[in-house]
Amino acid sequence: MGGRIDELDRKIVELLAKRCGEHIEELKALPPGEALYSAARARELSDFLESLELGPLSADIVKRIFSELSAFAVSAVRPPTVAYLGPAGTFTHSAMLDIFGASATGVAVKSIHDIFLEVETGRAQFGVVPVENSTEGAVTYTLDELMETELKITAEKYLRVTYSLVSVAKDMKKIKKLYSHPQSFGQCKEWIRKNLPDAELHNVSSTSLAAETASWDKLAAAVTSHASAEIYGLNVLATNIEDSRQNYTRFFVIGERDNPPTGRDKTSIICAVRDKPGALYDLLGPFDQAGINMTKIESRPDKKKMWEYNFFIDFIGHRENTIVKSAVEKMKEDLIFLKVLGSYPAEK
């Protein structure tokens, strides 16, 4: 292009290089053993970028650029090792890349249980797990693991999820079998009913594994991500086959350390109420009295006690906040148990 644009590009590159260098020095100065990735620092950077005058640039583009810069700085010192539901190409993998950047060392595992295990044993610093979908609701495997683990929720990520139908075949009429994760089938059930009503549905542990499995069979297709089609060299027979265009999956980052308050936080807890009239009303009372905004409540059967339930609750505020502390202590009076799963920067 030449001229003024070339000069601007040169200055931008020089400033970016300087910025990365200073960031690397800051990371090197952190105490030994402290995790270099911090959801709290990521929130501070995001808030700062949103406060700037960006002109024709969108905030998402600018955030993506700085997210990769931060990931590069972290990787230059000590790349984080992050466990995710594999193989490569799953939506959990996409969420991991959005959070940690392409420089992170990803560890693909076969199940949500294995993600927790990798972090609990120290083979990975962090794990990324799906927790709920806007169409299909809670990912119960994750809720069950959160019940048992001592790990903390350190961040959340909302990912827009779009599905493609991919296959070795080039004609949808030849498809006799479909492979995907049960949640993915649920998010595309109306499209499948209308377009492939006679296809056999086969559940597998991930959408990427579905693509890999379909690559072995000329009569099979996978409901998966577009990225999986590229990885396994498959034809894309249809795109955007999810039933809702507002199809989002929420992911948690799990790790060993708590986050400090950022001013825009959520806290997740799990609790069990005593078996008595008005128990659920009493559970929610302290939130109302303290003016705390509860954003989610999900019940799960207690696997150890028949017909008893545990409640997963998200609310606005940090566990170290005085009002939150007081409300949680008041809740304990009417509970069998209460466990704080973590406080983390709220993305939404």
Image (cartoon, grey):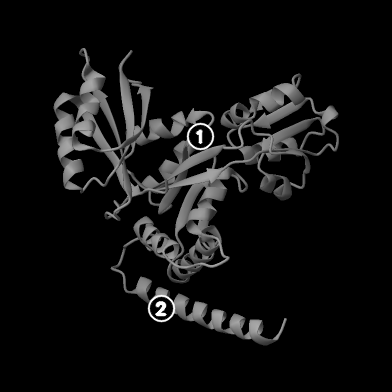
Q: Which image quadrant for residue 125?
A: bottom left
Helix or strand or loop: what does disc 2 sit on? Answer: helix
**Residue at point 40% right, 32% down?**
143
Q: Is residue 270 above or below residue 26?
A: above
Q: Which image quadrant for residue 244?
A: top right
**Residue at point 60% right, 30% down?**
187
Question: Relative to the observer, which residue lies in front, 157 or 153?
Answer: 157
Along the horizontal axis of the image, is 202 left or right of 56? right
The residue tagged 2 is 22
**Residue at point 23% right, 45% down?**
319
Question: Relative to the observer, which residue lies in front, 108 or 335?
Answer: 335
Question: Relative to the observer, which residue lies in front, 209 or 143?
Answer: 143
Along the horizontal axis of the image, is 21 left or right of 303? right
Residue 18 placement (x, y as % from top left): 47, 81
Helix or strand or loop: what does disc 1 sit on? Answer: strand
Residue 28 placement (x, y as % from top left): 36, 73
State the CA–CA distance, disc 2 to disc 1: 39 Å
The residue tagged 1 is 133
- Residue 268 appears in the rendering: yes
Along the horizontal axis of the image, is 47 left or right of 13? left
CB under 8 Å between callouts 2 and 1?
no
